[in-house]
Amino acid sequence: MSDAGTAKVFVITGPSGVGKGTLIKQLLERVPNLALSVSATTRDPREGEKDGVDYHFLTEEQFQERIAAKDFLEFATYSGNHYGTLNSELDRCLEKGRSVVLEIEVQGATQVRAARPDSVQIFIAPPDESVLRERLRGRGTDSPAAIDRRLKTAEQELAQQDDFAHRIVNDDLDQAAAELESIVRTATGS
Ligand code: 5GP
């Protein structure tokens, strides 16, 4: 088990549809003692998503109250909804000496970099942009209009990838997962 001295904050970012969720699932299976931060959002739950597990689903009013109370490490508006990382999520894990993984979009990642310069920032990039459209379509969770919005945002996010200390191209899933594991193990000394 890692001790509090080596507990790190890992920020995993990149455009919607790039495969962040799949890579993080693999990472959690490969590296013990990592905790995934559960974000807050105002978007509607998708089929099968559970409150407190996939997200803390909040109303607009609740989200604004949490902003006013300064409960967020970072928050951003993405495709018309708010998303944010609660400080309490981080503290809960770090106090136990566990490293925390944040799966967030690029504006939030930039805020975390400013607030926690010691965080390890990883950008997941697609091999090319057409892959994103295919993945978002294949996932079947977003309407065509929502997919178009996400792709427009993806262009802006890809323009910022050079700002990140680490960049992984998710072309081959196994190889990308191995690269991610290696970055995390190096940072935690595990
Ligand atoms: P989705 O609606 O597909 O679950 O998430 C949309 C985008 O919001 C994804 O890029 C996801 O990584 C990002 N996201 C999820 N949680 C957070 C968060 O707490 N903060 C920020 N800034 N982005 C988040």
Image: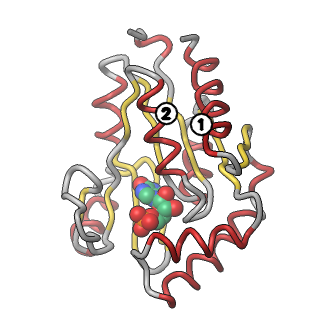
Q: Is residue 37 above or below residue 39?
A: above
Residue drawn at x 28%, y 74% is 44
Residue indicated by mark 2 = 27
Q: Is residue 183 above or below residue 45?
A: above
The amino acid marked with disc number 1 is Ala
Q: x, y percentage for residue 150?
A: 56, 76
Q: Is residue 115 above or below residue 70?
A: above
Element class at badge 2: helix
Residue drawn at x 68%, y 64% is 157
CA distance for labels 1 and 2: 7 Å
Left or right placement of residue 185 versus residue 34 in this view: right
The amino acid marked with disc number 2 is Leu
Q: Quadrant of the C terminus?
A: top right
Any part of residue 75 in sight: no
Residue drawn at x 52%, y 77% is 137
Residue drawn at x 50%, y 54% is 104
Q: Quadrant of the N terminus?
A: top left
Left or right placement of residue 70 versus residue 10 in this view: left
Q: Residue furthest bottom?
A: 145
Left or right placement of residue 99 versus residue 41 in this view: right
Left or right placement of residue 59 versus residue 38 in this view: left
> Which numbered disc, 1 or 2, marks the residue that appears first in the sequence?
2
Any part of residue 56 in sight: yes
Residue contact between numbered discs 1 and 2, judged by CB atoms under 8 Å:
yes
Residue indicated by mark 1 = 177
Q: x, y percentage for residue 76?
A: 48, 65
Q: x, y percentage for residue 8?
A: 50, 25
